[in-house]
Amino acid sequence: MATIGMKELAKKLKLSTATVSKALRDSYDISEKTKQRVLKLAHELNYVPNAHASGLRGKKSKTIAVVIPEVADSYFAQAINGVETVAQKEGFHVLVYLTHEQVEKENLILQELLNGRVDGVLISVTSQSKDVTTIDKLISTGIPVVFFDRVFEGQGNGQITTDDFDASYKLTVHLIEQACKHIVFLLFSESLNISTQRMNGYKRALHEYGFNFTENNLLICTNQDQENKESIYKLLARKDRPDAIIASVEKLIMPTYLACMERNLVIPGNIRVAAFSNLVQAEILNPAITTITQPAFEMGKTAADLLLKALKGKPIDQEESNVVLPSVLEIRNSTKTPF
Amino acid sequence: MATIGMKELAKKLKLSTATVSKALRDSYDISEKTKQRVLKLAHELNYVPNAHASGLRGKKSKTIAVVIPEVADSYFAQAINGVETVAQKEGFHVLVYLTHEQVEKENLILQELLNGRVDGVLISVTSQSKDVTTIDKLISTGIPVVFFDRVFEGQGNGQITTDDFDASYKLTVHLIEQACKHIVFLLFSESLNISTQRMNGYKRALHEYGFNFTENNLLICTNQDQENKESIYKLLARKDRPDAIIASVEKLIMPTYLACMERNLVIPGNIRVAAFSNLVQAEILNPAITTITQPAFEMGKTAADLLLKALKGKPIDQEESNVVLPSVLEIRNSTKTPF
DNA sequence: TTGAAAGCGCTAACAT
DNA sequence: ATGTTAGCGCTTTCAA
């Protein structure tokens, strides 16, 4: 049993496919009566237009791609949710592609999108991404690209980010106010804008409060949990052991907590810990962790809205294409000075 | 600058599109030399075949849909990862649809997939889903449907599940061995197979150990976090307050922990808590929570493998289409008898 | 070994 | 207000 197509629909109605097509798209030059007839039967027979045919014909696929490093991260999971909400409302389909933090994969994926599969792209780049040629190619092909969170400055048709610098600054100040004297920043990538923004906010706070910033203030992490845990474990044995750690991305929370446990260091008694994270369970961690929480859902929503607006050919002013949403510093027990 | 199409490619090579097409698909009746020439230029010019054209022509879209209740849940995030891994390897694209636990949405989504947009469907149904007509329609249209985790017994082209009954039984026995006398099971849905399986394993253990099962052993939860928290909060004030709680799905962990905190009940001192959850951070919760962890990634992978196999028209035997993977009971502090 | 041509299902320009 | 028809880009007979 195949699905019904427009031709059969037309035949049953004793109309031409053209009329049916127009009726379905609510064209002005079809009589109300005919429209009703068509709509009714289409509904009854569960007519669904063939996506490839309309895609081929109309050069529109009603599909967008979301290209992200991974799904198993609260931020991205929540962001996808936001994207999906908008897409569903507007009748768009969402293709999800995971780069697994590999630039090469990212590039292959973007290449594949060059030929009509999607109308637009939402992307949060890899920690090593630098090259914009494929993205430029997409755009010059007429496929708008909107960045969110991990953006390339000044690229694409829009950028949705958070105030990483400020948030990081505030968090660092908070730690300093909790009497921390040696805060180590766990850096995730040296090229990612979010990483440098976060690092710079941290540096700025250090500077303002008269602390020196040296290489010892930074621990460069990778995408390997085990590796990270070992580096942090070693970090905790340094003679100038830090009295606070800032995990610049969510995935660094686990290795940090575990390393502390293994070293028998109590958080926050012996060491304070804070993280950039959207983890829903932040409050019930042991101890509850102070976080900078991004409006992830909102960001996904905003990015999708912007993309769809671009797809509709609506004019987009500078302000709209460059949105910076505020993160929230949620202070919890992991950074509170115990008495 | 538009993207290059096969026609231009053919012209530049002084060949017909037919030859180019065959060369690209490595057809037997094209000379090796021509194939090389075609492949070379195609690569140089970044030729990407138009997805809609091939989709329309060949009735194959190289796309599968993953229909799930939500992404912001460790299980689903990990499962998508598994699906994506297989899809990427096989050159398939993945459309993700969220039902937000609403049957109506689920149905609309499935309806939309009836017409060629995807070659196959992976689904984990809504907590209220009961009707299989759309799924049957998909299958009879030639679009295979594979269920994972939240399945309809005996439906579709395959089912990937875990040993929920056994896992739940084991967990309950564990609690009983920890001297728990009044274990309450937080039920998420009354119709979902995973829910009933989990509940039945629990009941069985109670029974075997000589405990009565009454309505008081069950707390029916919803999809509303706040609502759930309140029910649990009330539960904790009953004269026969439970000495253990089993959260049958991950999202019930937060309300449970929070309710306990608000009632000043210490886990596991005053009450023990365990959950079905794939939360990566289980170990660093306060306290570390005992979980039944499903092989989520593996399940996604297995489901995708099965679906692709069906798409390739390979024969699938009963055993293959009905996979039950083992969950793991990870005992942590939340259920340990304190001394 | 290569090419000509039909057609996948739909849309839109152009008749009627 | 409705119908005819061409064509989107590709694949696949079938003929050369």
Image (cartoon, coloured by chain):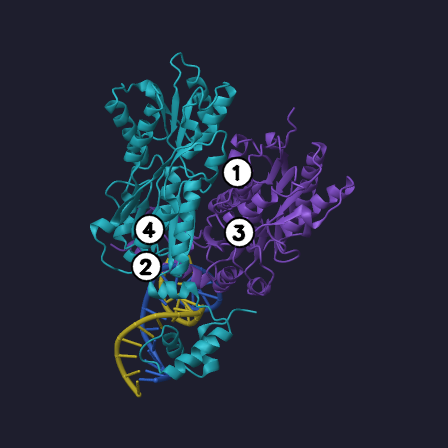
Chain colours: A purple, B cyan, C blue, D yellow
Location of the C terminus of chain B by quadrant is: top left
The disc numbered 2 marks a residue on which chain? A
Residue B173: percent from left, percent from top:
31, 27
Tell me, for residue A223, which label it has, or none.
3
Tell me, for residue B302, which label it has, or none.
4
CB contact under 8 Å: marks 2 and 3: no
Q: Secondary structure at mark 1?
A: helix
Tell me, for residue A180, which label it has, or none.
none
- Report whether residue B68 is seen: yes
Give the CA separation, mark 1 to mark 4: 36 Å
The disc numbered 1 marks a residue on which chain? A
Asked which quadrant contains residue B61, the reply is bottom left
Q: Secondary structure at mark 2?
A: helix
Give the CA separation, mark 3 to mark 1: 21 Å
- Report whether residue A293 is seen: no
In percent of the image, x 48 and y 23: which residue is there?
Answer: B259
Q: Mark 1 sits on what residue?
A: A262
Give the CA separation, mark 1 to mark 2: 69 Å
Whether B20 is drawn above or below B126: the answer is below
CB contact under 8 Å: marks 3 and 4: no
Q: Nearer the viewer, mark 1 or mark 2?
A: 1
Whether A238 is drawn above or below B36: the answer is above
Callout 1 environment at 10 Å: few (<14), some (14 to 19), or many (20+)? few
